[in-house]
Each structure stands twice: as C-alpha cells, then as structure tokens.
Image (spheres, helix red, strand yellow):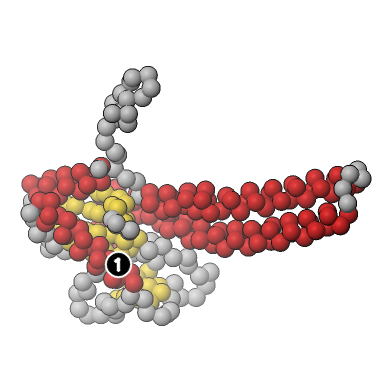
Amino acid sequence: MAGIFNRQGKRNPITEKPLRNAGQSLNEELDRLFNDRMLPYFLAAALFFIATIMNWLSYFSRSHLFLSNCFFTVIATVVIIYASLKIISLKKVADSLNLGLKGEKFIGEFLDSFKEKGYKVYHDIPGESWNIDHVVVSCDGVYTIETKTRMKPSKGEISVLYDGDSIRINGGPPETDAIIQAKAQSRWLREFIVKQTGLDIFIQPVILFPEWWVKKSSPHKPEVWVLNQKALPKFIECSGNSVSPENILKISNAIEGYVRK
C-alpha cells in the first residue's frame, strides 16, 4: 500500500512498467560502472590531492612538520596513482559498453522502422543474467536479434566471414560465442512462448553486425543468420515463415506482459 500512495495520500496513475528501450541494460550497466566503481576512485584521488595541497599550505605557514607532510604526500601519491590506474582500466570497460550501447540504439531505430509494416518490435528483453537485444514478431516469422558492434580498422580488410559454425572478423580467429548465445536466446524465447501461449513457433536467431560487410562461405542454410542490418528485411521476406494475426497477438501479449512485470 505504501508503494501505491505517497505521504500526501495521492496515488500514482501509472501502475505498470513501460516497455524497455534499445540498449537499456547497457545504459544501466554504464550507470552502475560509474556510480559504484569509478566514482569512488575519483573521489579518493580528489580528496587525497586536496588534502596534500592543504598540508603543504599549512607547512608553509609553519604549522606542520616537514617530515609528516612528506610522509602524507607519499601516501597520497600512491593512492592517486592506484586510483588513476583503476579509472583507466574501468574506462576501457566503459568505452566497450558505450560502443555496444550505440550499436544497440542504432539497430533499435532501424528495427523500429519495421513497425510501418505492422511488425511488432521489442527491445532489451531481460533474462535471468542476460538479455535479448531485440525481438521482431511479424507475419513473416519471429526473430531474436543480437547486435555485435565492432570497431573498424582504419585500413585493410573490413569484413565478417561466416561459415555457418563460426565467425571471423577481419581474418581473426574463429569465434563461436555469439553463435551459441544467439541459439540459446532463440531457444529460451521459444520455450517461453510455448509456456505462455501453447504455441510452438519457430524462432529464427539473428546476429547483426552494424555497417560491416558480411561474407558467407557455407553453401548450406545456417541455423543462425549473420548479417549486415541492411540485408535483414530481404531475409525476413524470403524466409518462408508465417505467423497468423491471431498468433502474433498472442505472442506479443505474452512478451509485453513479461516485460511489464
């Protein structure tokens, strides 16, 4: 009851959570990274720096001993160096999260344009310790979409090679984590829909590399689509999948009900 009424006895008219935005989990993770991990180091470095300045100002006013000031300055220097190294390390993590956030927002805006076709588009569907970046529900099938944003080299080859089982970025070592992740997300959503609606609908897992050229080396149709975002509409249209308007409504209601909890 206390959560519904405030101290003045007034009630919030909004009783359910909104749907989530593209990249919301990464945005929340960035906030936690700054507030819980980076900010304490900033404050520690700033406080020791200010304290050192104040100590030396008091020394020149002859109210403190030289040796005690030197000792404190050494301690402050160690703390400031340690805090600076931790901040630099955490900044690398923040830069990676920022890149992923920009990619998810970019793909989110791109997918939102599908709504003009009557498609349902959802972002940042939370799981237990992970999230599905995007879900598309349409008359042409249901799709889980994982966004992988990578920095491009300033020169040389700029391509993603997909052989159906692994991904190579710019001729690098084969990567399979994204494939495993996409399959797991698709499987989870399929099981969720069966549990909530009784419908056993095929869920196509998709991995998008924004603004990268994706090349395929396998003649067989892979279980997971790995694409540039511009190729996705054509793949959906030619997928051969079909979902009735009635089932689209059931699936959409199930997803929205889950997200709004």
Q: Is residue 189 left or right of residue 171?
A: left
x 30%, y 53%: residue:
126
Q: Nearer the viewer, residue 104 or 257?
A: 257
Secondary element type, mark 1: helix
Determine which quarter of the picture holds residue 220. bottom left
Q: How many C-alpha atoms fall within 10 Å of the one at disc 1: few (<14), some, or many (≥20)? A: some
Q: Is residue 156 left or right of residue 69?
A: left
x 78%, y 50%: residue:
52
- Residue 123 locus on image (x, y percent): 30, 50
Residue 153 in the image: above or below residue 7 = below
Determine which quarter of the picture holds residue 57. top right
* Tally of numbered tags: 1
Mark 1 — residue? 181
Determine which quarter of the picture holds residue 238. bottom left
Residue 248 in the image: above or below residue 185 = above
- Residue 213 locus on image (x, y percent): 37, 69
Quadrant holding the C terminus: top left
- Residue 254 locus on image (x, y percent): 16, 47
Quadrant holding the N terminus: top left
Q: Is residue 79 left or right of residue 112?
A: right
x 36%, y 76%: residue:
175
Q: Nearer the viewer, residue 12 or 256?
A: 12
**In the rendered structure, which amino acid carries the disc numbered 1?**
Gln
